Image (cartoon, rainbow, N blue to C red):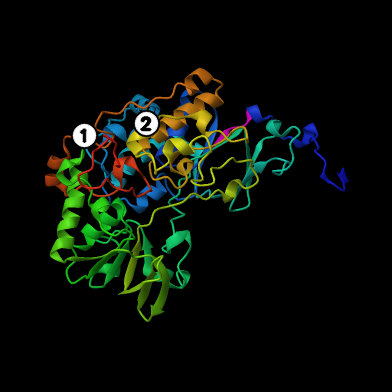
Amino acid sequence: MSGCCGPTAVELEPSHQAAHPGDLPVVVIGAGPVGLATAAHLTERGLGFVVLEAGEQAGASVAQWGHVRVFSPWKYDIDAAARRLLEADGWSEPDPEWLPTGAELIDDYLAPLAELFGDRVRTGAKVSAISRLGYDRVRTAGRERAPFLIRLADGSELHARAVIDASGSYATPNVLGASGLPAHGEAGAAELVDHALPDVLGAARDRYAGKHVLVVGAGHSAATTLLALAQLEDTPITWAIRAGNAARAYGGGAADALPARGALGTRLHAHVESGRIRLVTGFFTHSIERDGAQARVISRDPSGHEQTIAAERIVAATGYRPDHAIASELRLDLDPILGSTRALAPLIDPNAHSCGTVPPHGADELAHPEPGYYAVGVKSYGRAPTFLLATGYEQARSVVAALAGDWEAARDVRLDLPETGVCSSNLAEAQEQRVGLATGVSGGLLATPLPLATAGASRSGGCCG
């Protein structure tokens, strides 16, 4: 069994193999839009499944920004298989041109869809680790025939024929510190910091009203929070970005393919010009020092120049990153830069692509050396902020087709979007008059703030740049 050179590969006896993997369900991690879309496709393919959701409801992460209105209308927010299942149950699709809030996305789509699946959606079920039954990452012989072992935070375990991780990255935001490292003292100031999209006009109003607020970040999430804060009287606002100017954050203004998104940048620019929002550029968060009820946030740029901002509340709108720790005993082939699969990385690289120029991709690009394990949705993109909800739905369709053995369908990946991008809506301005500015998560993106195009730059028709 053992020798001086390390462990010997050993096949498990049949009595230790539990059920044959083909008799086991597919485990889907996460009951957000892409996780439930995956369940819909599994249903249509007749494959057994269990959805494990760490939160207490379907769309638990979406609920965290339920007050935010997305830029993409309903017609691009609903998966095709999910629509078919819901309509067969008597569901009526919302106005396809309406831009839903996160709460509407849950109430009018995700909750009814999860209800269709009954007890196959398990809430309060947080996955703590994934492995192969009887196999650590090193053992090879017979590995592909061993079921997956999924351990939950409560210590319970279940077995699966395949695992599709659609858990997203909302629970793992980027740090405030520059260079990808936490700022010195960041942990000690945690009680003063909220991550992207706090409900500053609703549930979190008392934490912000009348206090000096610092917002760090240059994406749509930062812009959304800044515009909301500007509605609070006697609330000083400072906006800190690393760039030398805010042109990218202001976007294309009136030239933006999406009127609501263009208005977002235009109004933000106006608040900065008027002095309602103080803009600080060249800000590289290096350390945070607590000083009673406030914090001193110190920037140190690459040249060593320092700036200091004192604030009572901080919003870290700095994006998200995936956490692959639960799959550390699986054989993953992750791109060293983005944390996506190596095959997917060049297709989504934000240095070369906006979400509108990411080509369709599916099971082949999402596959790892661990057969039967896939990450889909936001988590599949790693640190790339180029994810579209519609792209996640196509990922789910392709991966499920592959698990069903229909490789022709799995490889027939396509994304049918209008020339102006997935975000376009000819009712954007009309809706704004009815319910207010459509601010928030762009292009159906459910977690990641996106860089905006430089004002006046040519537009590719994509939703995020």
For mark 2, does the 10 Å Cα neighbourhood hold few (<14), some (14 to 19), or many (20 or more) residues?
Answer: many
Is residue 242 placed above or below 169 in the rendered structure? Answer: below
In the rendered image, residue 458, in percent from the top left (x then y), is placed at: 23, 39
Question: To which residue does mark 2 refer?
Answer: 79
- Place residue 259 in its image quadrant: top left
Residue drawn at 38 percent across, 48 percent down: 447
Determine if residue 310 is in view: yes
Q: Is residue 249 left or right of residue 79?
A: left
The residue sitting at 51% across, 29% down in the picture is 363
Q: Nearer the viewer, residue 357 or 147?
A: 357
Quarter where residue 277 is shown? bottom left
Q: Which residues are magenta?
A: 23-28
Residue type highlighted by circle 1: Glu
Q: Position of residue 205 (x, y in %)?
A: 26, 65
Amino acid type indicated by mark 2: Asp
The residue that disc 1 covers is 97
Q: Is residue 112 magenta?
A: no
Does residue 263 sit above or below 210 in this rendering?
Answer: above
Q: Residues within 10 Å of mark 1 (few under 14, many from 20)?
A: some
Indicate which disc residue 134 carries: none
- The alpha-carbon separation of the residues under discs 2 and 1 comes to 15 Å
Residue 325 in picture, x, y percent from top left: 58, 51
First reached walking from the N terminus: tag 2 or tag 1: 2
Q: Is residue 40 visible?
A: no
Residue closest to the far front: 303
